Every structure is written in structure tokens, then in C-alpha cells.
């Protein structure tokens, strides 16, 4: 008896498979190239969410207590950035925004930060619009709370800031409400912060 020969099935050539894979990869690359903007925009919000969640920094903002005698620190999270000036600007914006709890705001709500400069000696020049003075509630206590709210919030969170000079519309000012002299830069006053 003769042994049955197995029928040979024609093998696909390796060259054909490689050519098919190259064509497939080329088509995927072309689709990505043509629709790259749409693809990037669809993934961008998810990527930003994950990076911003990781890059947050905790600061203490100092607002007035209900009696106007002490400053009380309120924790706030700000975005951590490469440039510390951006973090400082965000801290001031949060201070203007006011407290989230039961503390008393120290800056008028229409106040805006215009510019910020920090020199190598640790002097921060913080330039506000006129609302800081025009909308201020007046009174020596309220003025002291405003000034040291700004100075302590900056110097106690950012060690590179040693003193703060408050400007309005880019110019040095005598005072915000007529009680506290602001001709010279102000140093922090940690003893105004209530110990909890």
C-alpha cells in the first residue's frame, strides 16, 4: 500500500505579510497625521486633569478674626508652578477672593493685583488697583489687618520674601486708610497670627 501524500497548502510568503503590516502601519500613521489636532484635543482635558491633581501646593492665607484683633490662617491649595512668581500671584488672587470659612475678608472684593516684582534682597513690590484704598472700610484695625494679611500671607508662605512694599497704580503710597504708614517696606508680623 502506498502511503497517502499530504496535500501541501500553499504557504503565504513572508514578504506578503511584511508588506501588509507596512501598509497597515502607514495607514494608521496617515490617519493620525491628518486627525492629530482632534486626537490631541480629545486627550488634552484628561492629561491636564491628571497633571493638575498632582501639582498642587498648600498655602495659608491670613484673614481677620471676627473681632479684628488677630489674623487666622486658612489653608488653601494653589497650583504648583515652575515660576514662583506665578504661585505668589495666585496666592494674592486667593486672598482677594476672600475666606471660604467664617473669617472676615481683609481686602475689598474689587481689588486687583496689577504687577508683582521681587528683587534679590527679598523685597516684593505688590502693585494693586485703586480699589484697595477707595473701597477700604477704613479704621485703624481694618487697615492693620489688610496690610499684615498681605505681608504675612506672602512672607510666611514664601521664604524668599522678607519685606513687602504695597503700591497702588505703580506708585508708593503714604497709607491705605490714613492710619498706617506705608512709605517704607513692611516686614512680617507673625505675632498677629492667632495660635490655634
Image: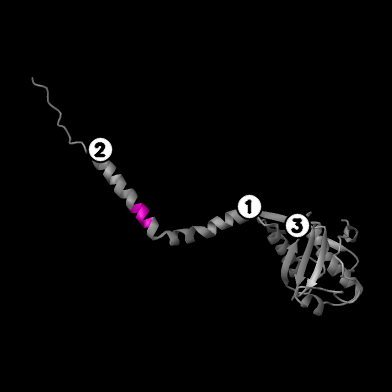
Residue assigned mark 3: 59
Which mark, by number, is residue 14? Answer: 2
Q: Earlier in the sequence, mark 2 or mark 1?
A: 2
Label 1 crowd (10 A; few <14 / some 14-19 / many >=20)? few
Quadrant location, the N terminus: top left
For the stretch drawn in magenta, the main secondary structure is helix
Residue assigned mark 1: 54
Q: Residue visible at 86% across and 68% down?
A: 145
Q: Does residue 98 appear anywhere in the picture?
A: no
Q: Quadrant of residue 11?
A: top left
Query: In the displayed structure, would residue 169 be above or below residue 16?
Result: below
Q: Position of residue 156 (x, y in %)?
A: 81, 56
Which mark, by number, is residue 154? Answer: none
Front residue of 192 and 150: 150
Quadrant location, the C terminus: bottom right
The secondary structure type at the circle numbered 1 is helix
Q: Position of residue 108 (x, y in %)?
A: 78, 74
Looking at the image, residue 157 sits to the left or right of residue 21; the answer is right
- Label 2 vs label 1: CA separation? 48 Å
Front residue of 54 and 130: 130
Amino acid at each position: 500500500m502506498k502511503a497517502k501524500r499530504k496535500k501541501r497548502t500553499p504557504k503565504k510568503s513572508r514578504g506578503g505579510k511584511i508588506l501588509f503590516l507596512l501598509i497597515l502601519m502607514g495607514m494608521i500613521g496617515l490617519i493620525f497625521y491628518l486627525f492629530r489636532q482632534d486626537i490631541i484635543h480629545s486627550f488634552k482635558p484628561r492629561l491636564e486633569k491628571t497633571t493638575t491633581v498632582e501639582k498642587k501646593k498648600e498655602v495659608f492665607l491670613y484673614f481677620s478674626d471676627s473681632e479684628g484683633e488677630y489674623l487666622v490662617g486658612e489653608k488653601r491649595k494653589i497650583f504648583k508652578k515652575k515660576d514662583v512668581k506665578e504661585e505668589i500671584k495666585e496666592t494674592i488672587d486667593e486672598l482677594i477672593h476672600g475666606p471660604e470659612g467664617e473669617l472676615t475678608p481683609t481686602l475689598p472684593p474689587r481689588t486687583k493685583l496689577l504687577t508683582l516684582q521681587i528683587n534679590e534682597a527679598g523685597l516684593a513690590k505688590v502693585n494693586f488697583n485703586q480699589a484697595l484704598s477707595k473701597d477700604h472700610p477704613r479704621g485703624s484695625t481694618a487697615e492693620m489687618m489688610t496690610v499684615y494679611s498681605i505681608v504675612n500671607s506672602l512672607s510666611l508662605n514664601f521664604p524668599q520674601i522678607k519685606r513687602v512694599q504695597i503700591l497702588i497704580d505703580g506708585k508708593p503710597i503714604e497709607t491705605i486708610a490714613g492710619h498706617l504708614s506705608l512709605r517704607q517696606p513692611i516686614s512680617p508680623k507673625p505675632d498677629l497670627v492667632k495660635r490655634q
